[in-house]
């Protein structure tokens, strides 16, 4: 078992998964930007890792060094230098409520920001992570769209997912025969800025276009995706609720983004 697979719940901090935190170019001239904002409405809250923008009077991208304190009623943004394809992990003091520490993420195409302001991205607190099975319903395979599938293990176990794809039309008729079954391996890259047991990245796998990857899916107009995570036999055991997944559906003409998440 690698060091990345030794991670366990920290008694001081709760993990918060931001599944998408990306800045950069995409297909068809898109320029993607993620707004990630933090606001405490009940006292100052110190994150475990300094990720927030520093003094804005400094010329550096994050101001004068990244900060860790979310001051009461002072909206803070997370510094873009921490962006990564696999998203970002925040660590907040245990006992903090999502009601009092608001964390909001929005992804938008800056090349088309005159037409739309972006799409809300789910922010997943540790208490809301999923077990070893989840389902994404009604995912299009229409060539007008490209659908990416993002898979996460918030405890950085370099594990395995089994994906079962079902034809939505057949499911509506009670036929649960899988259209396709495939396996996907998760990977975890250690960031040199990581503190012990406070990894900034989840274990992650990304399939950029599910139909281009698995052309058999084009036989259905839309699919349901059952996602089953593996539980390695280790001591102490890996946390049961550590998984998450989402589908990002992008219109090839407008670049409009739709997020489909479990439940």
Image (cartoon, rainbow, N blue to C red):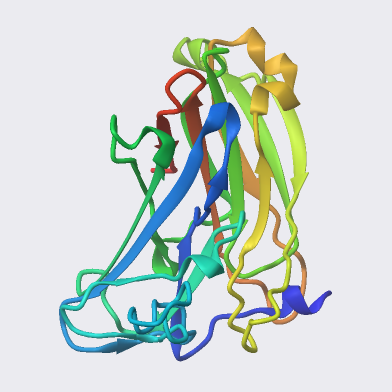
Give above or below for 119 relative to 42. Answer: above
User: Is residue 128 left or right of 39 when viewed as pictured?
Assistant: right
Residue at figure coordinates x 40%, y 29% from the top left: 256
Q: Please give the count of numbered marks on the rendered protein.
A: 0
Q: Nearer the viewer, residue 235 or 124?
A: 124
Residue at figure coordinates x 65%, y 89% from the top left: 196
Q: In the image as oriented, which residue stretches furthest toward the front?
A: 59
User: Is residue 97 left or right of 249 when viewed as pictured?
Assistant: left
Q: What is the quadrant of residue 64 in the picture?
A: bottom left
Residue at figure coordinates x 77%, y 68% from the top left: 233
Q: Nearer the viewer, residue 56 or 10?
A: 56
Q: What is the quadrant of residue 74 in the picture?
A: bottom left
Q: Position of residue 121 (x, y in %)?
A: 39, 49
Give above or below for 171 relative to 73. Answer: above
Q: Quadrant of the N terminus?
A: bottom right
Q: Position of residue 191 (x, y in %)?
A: 68, 74
Give above or below for 73 relative to 136. Answer: below
User: Is residue 209 left or right of 16 when viewed as pictured?
Assistant: right
Q: Position of residue 201 (x, y in %)?
A: 61, 67
Residue at figure coordinates x 55%, y 63% from the top left: 242
Q: Position of residue 216 (x, y in %)?
A: 73, 15
Q: What is the quadrant of residue 84 in the picture?
A: bottom right
User: Is residue 39 left or right of 33 when viewed as pictured?
Assistant: left
Q: Quadrant of the C terminus?
A: top left
In this rendering, does residue 87 appear at all? yes
Give above or below for 238 relative to 144. Answer: below
In this rendering, does residue 241 appear at all? no
Q: In the image as oriented, which residue stretches furthest toward the right?
A: 1
């Amino acid at each position: 078992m690698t060091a990345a697979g030794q991670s366990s719940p920290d008694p001081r901090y709760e993990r918060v998964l931001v599944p998408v935190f990306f800045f950069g170019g995409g297909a068809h001239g898109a320029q993607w930007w993620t707004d990630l904002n933090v606001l405490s409405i009940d006292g100052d809250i110190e994150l475990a890792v300094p990720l927030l923008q520093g003094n804005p009077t400094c010329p550096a991208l994050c101001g004068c060094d990244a900060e860790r304190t979310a001051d009461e009623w002072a909206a803070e943004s997370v510094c873009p230098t921490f962006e990564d394809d696999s998203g970002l992990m925040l660590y907040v003091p245990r006992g903090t409520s999502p009601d009092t520490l608001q964390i909001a993420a929005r992804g938008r195409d800056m090349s088309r920001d005159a037409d739309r302001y972006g799409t809300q991205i789910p922010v997943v607190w540790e208490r809301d992570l999923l077990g070893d099975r989840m389902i994404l319903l009604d995912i299009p395979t229409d060539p007008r769209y490209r659908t990416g599938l993002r898979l996460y293990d918030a405890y950085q176990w370099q594990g395995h997912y089994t994906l079962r794809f079902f034809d939505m039309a057949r499911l509506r008729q009670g036929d649960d025969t899988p259209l396709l079954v495939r396996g996907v391996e998760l990977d975890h890259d250690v960031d040199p800025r990581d503190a012990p047991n406070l990894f900034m990245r989840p274990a992650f796998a990304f399939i950029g276009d599910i139909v281009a990857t698995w052309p058999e899916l084009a036989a259905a107009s839309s699919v349901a995706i059952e996602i089953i995570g593996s539980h390695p036999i280790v001591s102490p055991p890996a946390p049961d609720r550590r998984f998450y997944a989402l589908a990002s559906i992008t219109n090839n003409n407008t670049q409009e983004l739709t997020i489909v998440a479990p439940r």
